[in-house]
Image: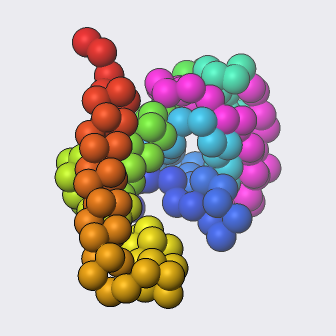
Amino acid sequence: MLDHVQARLDPAGRQVVEVTVHHGYRPHTIEARAGRPLRIVFDRRDDEPCSERVVFSSPRLDRRLVPNGLTVIDLPAQPPGEVRFTCAMGRYRGRIQLVADASGSNREHRGLGGALDSPGRRALALWLLTLPLVAIPSIALLDFGMAILVALVSLLACLVGCRWAFGQSRPRA
Ligand SMILES: [Cu+2]
C-alpha cells in the first residue's frame, strides 16, 4: 500500500482520504489542499492499544477509533502547513501536508489568460466579439465600405483601449 497519497475529491467537492490503522498508519503522509475541509476515514484493523486513539496537532483533536471498523473524522478548512496525527503515545505517526490552493487556481488562471496575454491579442479577441455589434448596424444604416471602415476604427479603438488598460493593470514593482 502507498505511504504517500493525495486526498481525492468526492462528487460533492469534499476532500476524502482513507487511512488504514494497523501497526501504524497507511498512508502515513497525506497531501491535501489547504482551505478546504478534509475527511479522513480511519480503518482500524485491530484492537491494539496503539490503534485506539488518534491525536491531531491542528485542530487539537483526540478521537477514539472503533476497533476493527471505520471511524470518520472531519477536519475543518485550514491554512497551508503541516498537521500531524499520532496515537496517544506518539508512536504511530502520520502527517497531512496542506498545500496552498492558490497554486492550482493560478495555474488555471494562467491557462485561461495565457492565450489572451498580450494587449494586441486581447484587443483582437474583443474586436472579434464586438464586430457583429458594430458591423451589422453599419451595413444596415450605411453601406458596405463604411461598415468596414467603422469596423477598422473599432479595432483601432480596441487596440488603444487594451494597451491603456494593460498598462494600468500591470503591477507596480
Ligand atoms: Cu501508541
Looking at the image, which is closer to me, 64 or 13?
13
Q: Quadrant of residue 116?
A: bottom left
Residue 23 belongs to magenta span: no
- Dominant SS in magenta: strand
Residue in view at x 60 percent, y 53 percent: 15
Number of numbered discs on residues: 0
Looking at the image, which is closer to me, 92 or 98?
98
Q: Specify start and end residues of the magenta stretch as a single range.
A: 61-86
Quadrant containing the C terminus is top left
Residue in view at x 60 percent, y 36 percent: 35
Q: Is residue 122 visible?
A: no
Q: Is residue 84 above or below residue 128?
A: above
State the image coordinates of residue 28 (x, y, percent, origin top left).
44, 42
Q: Quadrant of residue 41?
A: bottom right
State the image coordinates of residue 64 (x, y, percent, origin top left).
78, 38
Residue in view at x 56 percent, y 26 percent: 79
Left/right placement of residue 163 relative to residue 39 reads left
Looking at the image, which is closer to me, 13 or 124?
124
